[in-house]
Image (cartoon, rainbow, N blue to C red):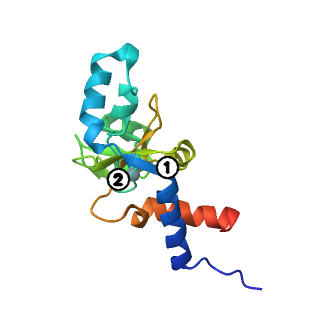
Amino acid sequence: MKKKTIDAYIIDRKAQQLVEWKVIMSATWLMDALREYSENHPDDAIFDMDDYYNGWEERCPECNSRNITTDTEAYRKENPEWASQHKEDNCYICEDCGASFDEPYIPEIYEYWFVDDGFANLLRKKDEFVLDTCWVPIWGRRATGQAIYIDGVIQEIAKELLEKYGF
Ligand SMILES: [Zn+2]
């Protein structure tokens, strides 16, 4: 018997349910104050500033990997085959896919949301920006201008939960 695929409508319903239950409230309006406080009070920080800056790491524009280098000379030595096909210098190189580029890609964060702990872990597995705080985690949303349940990452999580646990 052919396995049924989960219909887009069911995924939307699951994604809506997740947002309703797991996304607590907006943190965008608080973010500047929380960041300033954490920077000035390291012993009493709301979140770890290193975690915050990790969210802004440079990435490969081709494959989204954070494993990039500017040491073209060392990369050439270690990857003679790549070196024989590429002349470029003084650029960024992705150590995962071998792409070279002048500017790395830094995914923008448009909104911040307080989310439930379990949901934060699911988002983390998707390489999303998540900060642990002394309250509940903060998710940095890399989309805006549409309902949250439509975001690609939320749709993916909903689909995976349905595949794993059913409705
Ligand atoms: Zn890459």
Q: Which mark is residue 123?
A: 1
Whether residue 165 is visible here, answered yes or no, is: yes
SS state under label 2: loop
Q: Secondary structure at mark 1?
A: helix
Instruction: Tell me which amino acid carries mark 2.
Output: Ala
Does 109 appear above or below 148?
Answer: above
Q: Which residue is mark 2?
A: 99
Q: Residue at x 33, y 33 (%)?
A: 53
The mark nearer the N terminus, 1 or 2, is 2
**The furthest residue to the right:** 1
Q: CA distance from mark 1 to mark 2?
A: 27 Å
Is label 2 within 8 A of ligand 1 (CB to nearest ligand atom)? Answer: yes
Q: Nearer the viewer, residue 25 or 54?
A: 25
Q: Is residue 3 left or right of residue 6?
A: right
Rendered residue at 49%/49% (across/down): 123
Q: Residue at x 47, y 37 (%)?
A: 136
> Badge 1 local density, few (<14 within 10 Å), some, or many (20+)?
some
**From this viewpoint, which residue is outermost toward the bottom?**
1
Q: Residue 150: image x %, image y %?
A: 40, 67
Give 43 or 108, whichever is nearer the viewer. Answer: 43
45 vs 154, left or right, is left
Q: Which mark is residue 67?
A: none
Kind of residue at disc 1: Leu
Q: Marks 1 and 2: CB-CB under 8 Å?
A: no
Tell me, yes or no, if residue 107 can be seen here.
Answer: no
Which of label 1 and label 2 is nearer to you?
1
Q: How many marks?
A: 2
Query: Residue 56, image x and y in percent?
Result: 32, 39
Q: Quadrant of the C terminus?
A: bottom right
Q: Residue at x 25, y 26 (%)?
A: 36
